Image (cartoon, grey):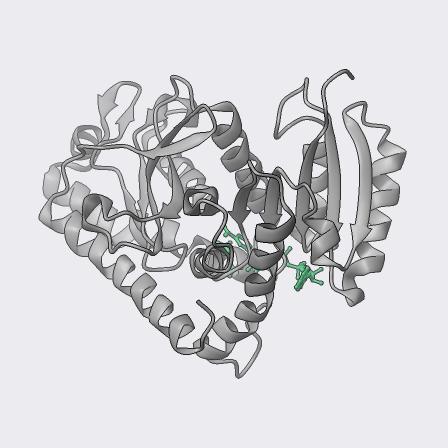
Amino acid sequence: MGRTPVTVTITGAGGQIGYALLFRIASGGMLGDDTPVRLRLLEIPQGLRAAEGAALELQDSAFPLLAHVDVTDDPAVAFDGANVALLVGARPRTAGMERGDLLQANGGIFGPQGRAINDHAADDVRVAVVGNPANTNALIAASNAPDVPRERFTALTRLDHNRALGQLSAALGTPVGGIRGVTIWGNHSATQFPDVAHATAGGDPVPTVLAARMGGTEAAHDWLVDQFIPRVARRGAEIIEVRGSSSVASAASATIDHVRDWVLGTGDRGWTSAALWSHGEYGVAEGVISSFPVTSQDGTWSVVEGLAVDAFARERIDASVAELVDEREAVRSLGLI
Ligand code: NAD
Ligand code: LMR
């Protein structure tokens, strides 16, 4: 392997999603078959043994692209020279915990990690936040990294995007690869807006296909409002109920998709969804990290411009953005940003 390894830092690497991520990254699934990787696994002391165990298994897998693995509980070491940072480790909500408690607990994680990224990561660092509440955790990290361009801090809504593709595919009988133009707007929470107004299935407009299958535009709209949108937006809760714990492999897979598209480009596959720092696009409040329709070229995400937003979409987008603004006010009042 002639190329310089790309340094990928994974926080919470001893946890469930970490375990599902590591082997795909090391096998080239994230950055490509020709890119060697150096993995830096960050854990808290209680999680170190699990991360060390994963490191042993990585060694046993003899991945040709895997240059080195470090395991540490020191963010300064973990983010040293990081080109890609996957912030997975977060404080889960436990019984009796209010939203403010959760934001404060996570502020204690993502503030210091933002500062460590600021001080130690490579100049080209790209950050994807997975740990919940992902959008606001990304905002906290970005706000604590003043020397890193804000556009480099993103939060994962690709899982929601993939869920929307899966639901549409099942409803329409079109393979997921034939569906384009789906957008997740807003927060990675139940307020998110999965939008199919501009989507196509097999080249045909999804709203038209739905109306034809469901007996008219009103019936199609009812299906979107009563079934599709809540199913996608509450899929995380459904997985927790059915599996007994939150999504792992699908979350890791979406994280791989997010970073691969960011670094290698979306090409001619149309747009996907990612939560980015808002500059006010589509009337979204500036300075929150909100999901948009995005493409990537040369390692940079761009928000797709010029999509029509009707009154229904406006209301849904505004509701999710209002939640992001509330979360921002909460972390601001806690002194976290
Ligand atoms: P997990 O509990 O199995 O693993 C989390 C790991 O993070 C643990 O090993 C823990 O020790 C570690 N950790 C905690 N604080 C840390 C810190 N300060 N630094 C480094 N490591 C730390 O949880 P999981 O199933 O892997 O999920 C991780 C997070 O991802 C959760 O917040 C979950 O809600 C979130 N999630 C997000 C999405 C999404 O689409 N954005 C989807 C699924 C899960
Ligand atoms: C998911 O969307 O599966 C997770 O964000 C759910 C959760 O609360 O961990």
Quadrant the N terminus occupies: top right
Residue 188 picture location, percent across and down:
41, 54
**For residue 15, side relative to residue 328 (left or right):** right
Q: Quadrant of ligand 1?
A: bottom right
Residue at 65% across, 49% down: 120
Give above or below for 3 relative to 248: above
**For residue 126, side relative to residue 209 (left or right):** right
Residue at 33% across, 27% down: 180
Residue 269 picture location, percent across and down:
39, 21
Residue 197 vs residue 293, the one in the foreground: 293
Residue 52 vs residue 227, the one in the foreground: 52
Quadrant hosting residue 168: top left
Residue 46 picture location, percent across and down:
79, 67
Residue at 57% across, 36% down: 256
Total residue callouts: 0
Quadrant hosting residue 55: top right
Give above or below for 219 relative to 139: above
Residue 337 vs residue 209, the one in the foreground: 337
**For residue 225, side relative to residue 287 (left or right):** left
Quadrant the C terminus occupies: bottom left
